[in-house]
Amino acid sequence: MLNIASLTELLAQPQKIVITTHHKPDGDAMGSSLGLYNYLVQLGHDVKVITPTDYPQYLSWMPGNDEVIIYTDNLKQSAAFIAGADIIFCLDFNALGRINEMGDLVGKSSAVKVLIDHHLEPEDFADYCYWDIKACATAQLVYRLIVKELKHKELVNKDVASCLYAGIMTDSASFSLPNTTSEVHRVTAELMDAGAVNWQIYDLVYNNSPENRLRFLGLCLSERLEVLYEYNTAIIAVTKQDLYKYSILTGETEGIVNYALSIAGIRLAAFIVERHDKVKLSLRSKGDIPVNDICKKYFNGGGHRNASGGTSTKSLEQVVNQFKLILPEYKKLLIQ
Ligand code: 5GP
Ligand code: MN
């Protein structure tokens, strides 16, 4: 196991570095990865950010985005970079399965592996873990690593700051979740002092929907929403045909689940979507309702207590029914 002193020493010499993050990267995955990228290149390292899959357009404004390698589009090149890396940073995920086929390549690589993450119970694959489940975002931990451990606050320039700000803003649901501590606000204030323009970043991320996504949201809310008041639960279930009809791309369903959770009295919300080979669930909750337990136990997934995801190979209808049948188990927590 490495410690911070040996990591500091390692980073004192130019290294070949790969940064990777979970599949279907979200704002924190890309923000933490590109924030770290923009820091490491200033130290003279040769850095590649490799994502297991593509990611939504509203994240493509981030500095360094043009250099990102998407694994599924560049299999050979990605495999060569992973095999030849001296250090691999694994950001915003806790298990190699979260990076799809890249998990095997990273597992086999002789590189030093550094995990930076805020999910529960990381798998034991890294040589050094910078890990805190209380952090609201991996981007917050990247900032802490750079400033507190590596003592390079002066290298947090506008590019680093903008990416990290976006990661924190998105994973904290715009500073609305309980893990938005005073430290989070202090960090974001420092990121603004370093050049991150808060309102511009908000605009780039949230006021950037294609028209079809908004119309699809309309369909979800008017036709696909089911509210089960006896369990304070709301479900939005959408079919493959819905996605096709509205030309919805990966990532464009992000955040829709929060509308279901915004109904007065609702404490558990599920967005259940039929993809080409499986059904994907996004669960959100309030208070003590452990959606990570539900996802782990029933849907081959996990995440945080109030925000988790999972999958199933059953049909959409079966998954919706299965989800409803699980609710009595959590009734005490749901009807508090
Ligand atoms: P989302 O609903 O946005 O896909 O995911 C919410 C949270 O759950 C994220 O923090 C994500 O990392 C986690 N998550 C989503 N899908 C999975 C999964 O299949 N397995 C695990 N372990 N975590 C997941
Ligand atoms: Mn995250």
Image (cartoon, rainbow, N blue to C red):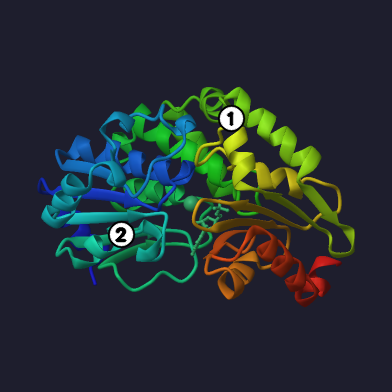
Quadrant into which the N terminus falls: bottom left
Classify 10 Å Cα crowding around label 1: few (below 14), some (14-19), many (20 and above): few
Measured along the vertical axis of the image, is residue 200 above or below residue 68? above
Please name the amino acid that badge 2 sits on. Answer: Glu
Image point (53%, 27%), residue name: 198
Nearer to us: label 1 or label 2: 2
Helix, strand or loop at label 1? It is: helix
Image point (65%, 50%), residue name: 177
Q: Is residue 80 visible?
A: yes
Measured along the vertical axis of the image, is residue 113 above or below residue 246? below
Task: Give how far across and how far down residue 75 sits, in percent.
Answer: 22, 48
Image point (61%, 51%), residue name: 273
Considering depth in this image, is 62 or 52 the residue closer to the camera? 52
Which mark, by number, is residue 206? Answer: 1
Q: Is residue 331 left or right of residue 47?
A: right
Q: Is residue 173 visible?
A: no
Task: Give how far across and how far down residue 290 sits, in percent.
Answer: 66, 68
Helix, strand or loop at label 2? It is: loop
Q: Is residue 213 left or right of residue 218?
A: left
Classify 10 Å Cα crowding around label 2: few (below 14), some (14-19), many (20 and above): few
Considering depth in this image, is 32 or 191 the residue closer to the camera? 32
Measured along the vertical axis of the image, is residue 47 above or below residue 212? below
Q: Is residue 242 left or right of residue 265?
A: left
Residue ID for mark 2: 101
